[in-house]
Image: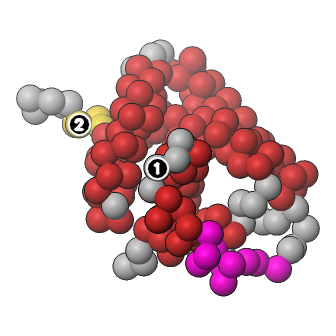
Amino acid sequence: MKTITEQLAFYAAYHRNPYNIATHFVGIPAIIIGILIPMGWLRVHGVALPISGALAFVVAVWIYYLLLDRTFAFLALLPIVPAFLIADAIARMAWGPSIAWAFLLFVGGWIFQLVGHSVFEKRKPAFLDNLIQLLIGPLFLLAETVFALGFRKDLHDAVQTVSHQFDPVSDA
């Protein structure tokens, strides 16, 4: 398994433009909620705590984050829990509004992502070269926030150094 430095460095190599990164702060949360809504429709009842596909997915991704970096895994709960709760509330709505919200958030989020990559970055998204990067995007946003606040300078410096070996050839 790659380290957090390697995963973030690979992602960072595709995200050098600050305007592209800014679009990700809107697009990624929208996509996450948009994905979790239909996962929330899949529910197992009859247990003490209803378990949904969304909850199972969130727990699995969180365990992966825990394996990468304990500090970031716990910090990731700050955006993950509200995103899950919003998605869960929408998943419990009537079908029409629930489907509409899932579609709007998922498609709208991807529009932000594509604008960021095609207009500002002029590079394809990292996940087109490595699918695990779909799980790293939210962690990258968290890392960018932590780094901007002046924390984890050692990791930030390592990510910047290692990311240059992953610089993709511009494919715009």
- Residue at the image position 59 percent from the left and 78 percent from the top: 162
> Label 1: few (<14), some or many (≥20) within 10 Å?
few
* Chain part drawn in magenta: 160-169
Q: Is residue 91 visible?
A: no
Q: Is residue 146 left or right of residue 126?
A: left
- Residue at the image position 77 percent from the left and 49 percent from the top: 18
Q: Residue 110 sits in which quadrant?
A: top right
Reply yes or no: does residue 77 show up in magenta. no
Callout 2, which amino acid?
Answer: Ile
Residue 5 percent coordinates (x, y): 48, 71
Secondary structure under the numbered disc 1 in the rendered image: loop
Front-most of 111 and 158? 158
> What colour scheme does the image use?
secondary structure
Residue 56 percent coordinates (x, y): 29, 47
Residue 116 percent coordinates (x, y): 80, 49
Q: Earlier in the sequence, mark 1 or mark 2?
A: 2
**Residue that badge 1 annotates:** 151
Query: How far apart, in angstroms, are the residues tagged by discs 1 and 2?
Result: 35 Å
- Residue at the image position 57 percent from the left and 38 percent from the top: 29
Q: Is residue 28 left or right of residue 108?
A: left
**Residue that badge 2 annotates:** 51
Secondary structure under the numbered disc 2 in the rendered image: strand
Assign the magenta stretch its main secondary structure.
helix
Q: Quadrant of the C terminus?
A: bottom right
